[in-house]
Amino acid sequence: MSSAPDSGWFGHPKGLSTLFFTEMWERMSYYGMRAMLVLFMTASLQEEGLAFTVASAAAIYGLYTGAVYFLGLPGGWLADRLFGGQKAVWYGGIIIMIGHIILAIPHDYSFFIGLIFVATGTGLLKPNISAMVGQLYSDADERRDGGYAIYYMGINMGSLIGYYVCGYFMENVGWHWAFGAAAVGMAIGLVQYKLTLNNLPKHSALPANPLGSKGTSRAWGGIAAFVIAAAAVTTAAMTGAIVINPTVVAGYTAIVFTIIFFVYFGVIYFTGNLTDAEKQRMWALFLVCIASACFWSGFEQAGSSLNLFARDYTDRLIGTFEIPTTWFQSLNSLFIIALSPFFAALWINLSKSLVSPSYSVKCAIGLIIMASGFLVMFMAAHYAAEGLKVAPYWLVTTYFLHTVGELCLSPVALSAVSKLSPKRYTGQMMGVFVLTYSIGNIIAGLLAGNFDPNNVDEIPNLYLQIALFSIGVGVVLVLMTFKAKVWEKQGLEEKVS
């Protein structure tokens, strides 16, 4: 893989601009639509919503967000073995746009069909566009980290646009106009991608490990079988031939994903011919995975229970202007943009001062800080239980703490996977790690199902339980500090040698 010869975009390859803007508009469509999901599902029929219970809406939300991460596994495989990265991103974007268009159609059947399309397209686009950023640089190119930092900025810019645009349309025009705005955003990204495709290196258009002719035929047969099966199940559910309880499905899905995680992790650990040091390093990585799943089960309350709290129990009036509900979720992106440089410098300065916490401790700190946000919501919910509309600063404080927790845990966990995984299993372990996102998102949906607007007295207990559980896991990880540090150190020393 050769480094891109040009430096025509802020000192980086021109291809970075192609991927930056494609990802920005894709994230605009994803986060803009996602911010409305639970609100739309729980809105009354008079408000042109679906009038689902909170439990069902939250479970569907968790299944959707969990599926997005899970489908990234087959999405990456298809690009590596069949399409190549460029076509995977193009096909994925088209499928996403079609999904948003279907969501914009005011019909009883359009909602779930649209969600399936968006989740499938995102699973195809998201992992491959991220991988293509790395393909712009050679292994020795020192611009790589800076390129990913710029790319990550595009993600946050896109989410901000999505929250503000779709949130405005939702509040002032209508639900389906807001879903349509997400489709327009993805369309802009696709047009930009196609017009600047020549900026990308040619090797990113080719599958890294292509299948033979027989394998290709089988792969297309598998894709056709998946489409037929999905269409059959969806049709049966829509016509009432089968009855699907979202909460039950979410519970079983969480169990299945967890079993897959433990089985895959165990197979590599017990049958991967690992050295003793590699096995110790795997134990350290296991702790990081546990922290990740617990963290996302709390953090992803942003789109469900915290979203409902903003709508129903927060005083959103500033003079005569009412803050759109979804705008509160934009606080996470704003805080990330503001705080990322600080945290990047923090770990470097701590290392220079010979203070280098283990990965599990850094993740534990992130988990505990995130949990403190729910202690804030526990107090805010008490005021709501007394029949009061609470001030917006409660949610602002919570999102600030959640963002600080995310910056402590998320980049550190990704770094842990790349550094602690046995070298020959790094790709597979990254796939296993992504399962913690899916597990956490589905559990988040199940927890948010306990947010009962008809029983406001129980809402403080929901947030207190999430806080105490997360703090408990964080404390256990901190207590294992010394052992985790030994596992990491021994494994890394062997990796260097």
Image: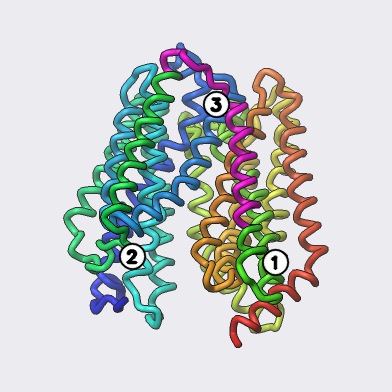
Q: Amino acid at mark 1?
A: Ala
**Residue type (three-letter) at the residue carrying disc 3:** Ala
SS assignment at label 1: helix
Using the image, determine if residue 455 lies above or below residue 143.
above
Q: Vertically, is 40 above or below 433?
A: above
Mark 3 or mark 2: whose residue is earlier in sequence: 3
230 versus 79 height, above or below = above
Depicted 290 relative to depicted 161: above or below: below
Q: Mark 1 or mark 2, which has the lower sequence index?
A: 2
**Viewer-side residue, 416 vs 405:** 416
Residue 298, how many percent across, how many down? 65, 44
Instruction: Return the mark for residue 284.
Output: 1
Residue at screen point 50% across, 17% down: 242
Q: Quadrant of residue 266?
A: bottom right
Judged by depth in the image, the label closer to the viewer, 1 or 3, is 1
Picture residue at 38% right of the left edge, 77% below the top: 143
Q: Residue 169, located in which quarter of the rendered image?
A: top left
The residue under label 3 is 57
**What's the CA distance linking mark 1 and mark 3?**
36 Å
Start and end of the magenta stretch? 237-265
